[in-house]
Image: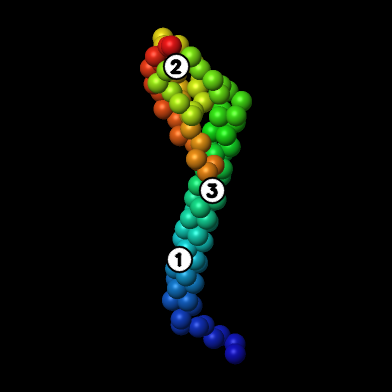
Amino acid sequence: MPGYEPSQQRFLHKSTLIIQVISLIIYCAFIFQFSRLIGNDYKSYINNKSQGMIYTLEMFDKSPCVNIKNAKVSFLGDGNVLVATRNNDKYSFKAMKCEIK
């Protein structure tokens, strides 16, 4: 139809723009939540592997300390030691004073 101008053109343009902005916000929120989920898994993986490496490679089974039983130790200096215990792939670390035999 020659000379026909739709009267709803401005309204449709605004509603389309609003829907696009809302879709972009939902998409960004989804990506953000997904990355946080993956990021937490990665952090726990790295944390667990580094604790296992420290426990296995850097600590000693035997120590001259009287107050430490059934644990591995690493010497920190000034009479302090880092004591580590393992329970079902969970590691527990704490610093203690070493009481020498």
**What x and y, as percent, mark residue 74?**
51, 20
The quarter holding residue 100 reads: top left
The quarter holding residue 56 reads: top right
Residue highlighted by disc 3: 41
Instruction: Give the camera-side residue of 27 and 79.
Output: 79
Near mark 1 (Cα within 10 A), the count class, few <14, some 14-19 or many ≥20, is: few
Residue extending furthest toward the bottom: 1
Tell me the CA gap for discs 3 and 1: 29 Å
Name the quarter where the C terminus is drawn.
top left
Q: Which mark is residue 99?
A: none
**What x and y, as percent, mark residue 75?**
49, 16
Name the quarter where the N terminus is drawn.
bottom right
Residue highlighted by disc 1: 22
**What x and y, as percent, mark residue 59?**
55, 23
Image point (47%, 58%), residue name: 29
Residue highlighted by disc 2: 65
Instruction: Give the camera-side residue of 26 and 10.
Output: 26
Residue 69's place in the image compared with 91, above or below, is above
Looking at the rendered image, the disc whose residue lies closer to the viewer, 3 or 1, is 3
Q: What amino acid type should be assigned to the residue bearing mark 2?
A: Cys
Image point (43%, 23%), residue name: 68
